[in-house]
């Protein structure tokens, strides 16, 4: 973490700069009943951010507006609205190139509109943090929860984490800066949650002291020089060397791409330390495992309770980070499982595909149930699909009780 | 992921992988790595010194973080690097040629780099081939640019690479230190001096 020597000093808002480990592990916590959007605000209050750039799109608009209040209160160095999501993400790059700690939020079509910027952020090694409050992206328009947009982020070179609860969200915003700003990582982070389910519901969240904050970002630990117009990565548009048609240019660009993905791999060590592992496993000896990320994990927990009432033993695997992908952890956690159930809030089942590509005997994976377009996922349908897999008859949940 | 991949001198491949993607992990404070295996720093000091003394053209590549006196630490490191270079020159046989070739910046060099006077992270192999460098040490190069170079060197040359990194180290080097300071560079010079005469110079 940057600038440990500043611990104990005051920042621009009069907050005391805390040792990050002590702030997040030993400092006294205050239970608070907040919406997810309010939780984003409270985490950013303690993140010592230099710049936040906003653009309205549901369901992140409320968080973006609340962070404007933080700017008015003096907790953020600069805050403004971009002309579009594409503009916002480009402006975030400019601020980060200049050595600022940058925060932004987006959702759904906004994520898609800004997509060109994300591999650019990663290639330029900019540790910007972007909250993605996932929603539908396709026509006909839907503002409701849907995690399809995460699948588009997985190959951008960004770190991608998927929060289940508001508490995850609070802690991971702060921990996200710590991990992503490590000099051997130094990559942007897409911190995703399921829109509305997390952003617009209230939950009890344990907050760290409001008068303490993270140490500031130290741009001198960056693995690339900041804002040198003559050198890559800033030297993009003028005489871009990697666009020359020769072997050396191709080899340089290839090595550059490899380095971005190497940095994702390096983040494992830090993420394991700060998130207490890349996955969380409950009852690993069960024959049936529900493996998922985001709020599908919460629904899986409820399904587990229902099935246990029927005498069916279930385990849960919560995947916290999608990039880095916890391949070895998932292989180990699912080693004994006979059936692996992957419930998802999207139509394509991208998480199940990733898991199938990771484990031996992929026929054990049941890709589903899937809901999308804003549908909820009642735990009963997870339980019903598991019973069907086991050959146990259960009532249809879609009819009218005939 | 446990790794069986070893970071060894090349030429390895048309496009060698990033060592991190092959499961090689960076050392923690007080450690170093040799070929991807974590070792204590003192062991790496001895191996690096022996590698320098056994090379035909042991070379130091100082980067912009130590070439410009932008703070007191950088100036001290530069003095230590000069001392290491002078020590190398004193300790090698007449058949060996110690070199110090700067990487002053990362600008692509057109139409052609002069490999006798500089190295560039985008085509480091040209400088290594031209000068027949068989062992080199990166110091004061930004980590991203160092890793670009180290992979390209491993891909297309037989050069043994050492990284004296001020941050977390480099898996793509064959031997890497971390948390480099002027004192650490001076310690490496001490190791070279201590081992003088005990390492057989390379045969033609």
Image: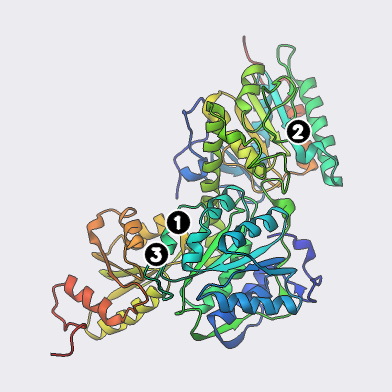
Which residue has dot 1 on it? A154
Parent chain of label 3: A
Residue A30 x %, y % = 63, 86
Residue A295 x %, y % = 41, 75
Question: In the rendered view, would you say A375 is above or below A262?
Answer: below
Marking on residue A148 = 3
Which residue has dot 2 on it? B104
Q: Are marks 1 and 3 in contact (CB under 8 Å)?
A: no
Task: Please say whether residue A238 is visible from this viewpoint.
Answer: yes
Residue A220 x %, y % = 74, 51
Tell me how far mark 1 sits from mark 2, CA to CA: 36 Å
Which residue is more in the foreground, A233 or A125? Answer: A233
Task: Please say whether residue B174 is visible from this viewpoint.
Answer: no
Of helix, strand and loop, which one carries label 1?
loop
Density class for disc 2 (Cα within 10 Å; few <14, some 14-19, many ≥20) is some
Which residue is more in the foreground, B100 or B6? Answer: B100
Density class for disc 1 (Cα within 10 Å; few <14, some 14-19, many ≥20) is some
Decide if residue A20 is on the left or right side of residue A317.
right
Which comes before the other along the chain, label 1 or label 3? 3
Residue B18 x %, y % = 51, 40
Parent chain of label 2: B
Of helix, strand and loop, which one carries label 3?
helix
The colour scheme used here is rainbow
| Labels 1 and 3 positioned on one and the same chain | yes
Marking on residue A31 = none
């Amino acid at each position: 973490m940057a600038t440990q020597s500043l611990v104990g000093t005051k920042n621009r808002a009069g907050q005391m700069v805390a040792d990050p480990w002590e702030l997040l592990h030993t400092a006294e916590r205050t239970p608070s009943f907040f919406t997810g959007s309010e939780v984003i605000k409270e985490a950013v209050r303690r993140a010592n951010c230099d710049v936040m750039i906003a653009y309205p799109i549901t369901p992140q608009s409320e968080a973006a507006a609340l962070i404007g209040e933080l700017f008015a209160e003096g907790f953020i160095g600069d805050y403004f609205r971009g002309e579009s999501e594409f503009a916002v993400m480009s402006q975030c790059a400019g601020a980060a190139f200049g050595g600022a700690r940058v925060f932004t939020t987006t959702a759904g079509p906004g994520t898609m509109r800004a997509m060109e910027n994300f591999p650019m952020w990663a290639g330029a090694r900019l540790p910007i943090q972007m909250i993605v409050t996932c929603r539908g992206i396709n026509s006909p328009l839907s503002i409701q929860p849907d995690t399809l947009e995460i699948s588009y982020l997985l190959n951008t070179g960004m770190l991608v984490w998927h929060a289940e609860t508001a508490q995850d969200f609070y802690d991971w915003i702060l921990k996200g800066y710590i991990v992503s700003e490590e000099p051997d990582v130094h990559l942007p982070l897409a911190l995703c949650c399921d829109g509305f389910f997390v952003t617009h519901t209230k939950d009890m969240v344990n907050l760290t002291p409001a008068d303490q904050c993270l140490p500031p970002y130290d741009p001198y630990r960056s693995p690339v020089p900041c804002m040198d117009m003559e050198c890559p990565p800033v030297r993009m548009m003028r005489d871009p060397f990697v666009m020359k048609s020769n072997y050396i240019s191709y080899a340089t660009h290839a090595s550059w791409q490899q380095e971005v993905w190497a940095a994702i791999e390096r983040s494992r060590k830090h993420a394991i330390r700060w998130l207490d592992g890349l996955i969380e496993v409950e009852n690993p000896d069960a024959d049936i495992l529900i493996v998922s990320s985001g709020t599908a994990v919460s629904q899986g927990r409820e399904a587990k309770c229902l099935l246990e009432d029927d005498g069916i033993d279930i385990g849960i695997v919560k995947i916290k980070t999608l990039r880095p992908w916890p391949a070895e952890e998932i292989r180990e956690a699912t080693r004994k499982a006979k059936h692996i159930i992957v419930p998802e809030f999207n139509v394509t089942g991208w998480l199940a595909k990733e898991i199938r590509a990771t484990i031996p005997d992929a026929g054990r994976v049941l890709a589903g149930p899937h809901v999308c377009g804003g549908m909820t996922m009642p735990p009963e349908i997870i339980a019903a699909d598991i019973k069907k897999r086991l050959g146990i008859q259960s009532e249809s949940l879609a009819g009218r009780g005939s | 992921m446990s790794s069986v991949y070893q970071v060894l001198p090349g030429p390895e491949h048309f496009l060698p992988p990033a060592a991190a993607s092959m499961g090689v992990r960076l050392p923690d404070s007080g450690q170093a790595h040799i070929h991807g295996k974590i070792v204590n720093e003192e062991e790496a000091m001895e191996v690096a010194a022996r590698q320098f003394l056994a090379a035909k053209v042991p070379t130091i590549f100082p980067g912009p973080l130590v070439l410009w006196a932008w703070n007191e630490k950088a100036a001290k490191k530069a003095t230590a690097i000069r001392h290491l270079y002078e020590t190398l020159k004193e300790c090698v046989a007449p058949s060996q040629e110690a070199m110090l070739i700067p990487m002053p910046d990362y600008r692509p060099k057109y139409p052609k780099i002069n490999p006798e006077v500089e190295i560039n992270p985008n085509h480091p192999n040209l400088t290594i081939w031209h000068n027949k460098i068989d062992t080199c040490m990166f110091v004061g190069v930004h980590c991203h640019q160092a890793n670009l170079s180290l992979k390209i060197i491993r891909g297309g040359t037989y050069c043994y690479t050492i990284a004296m990194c001020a941050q977390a180290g480099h898996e793509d080097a064959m031997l890497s230190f971390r948390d480099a300071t002027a004192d650490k560079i001076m310690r490496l010079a001490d190791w070279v001096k201590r081992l003088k005469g005990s390492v057989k110079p390379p045969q033609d």
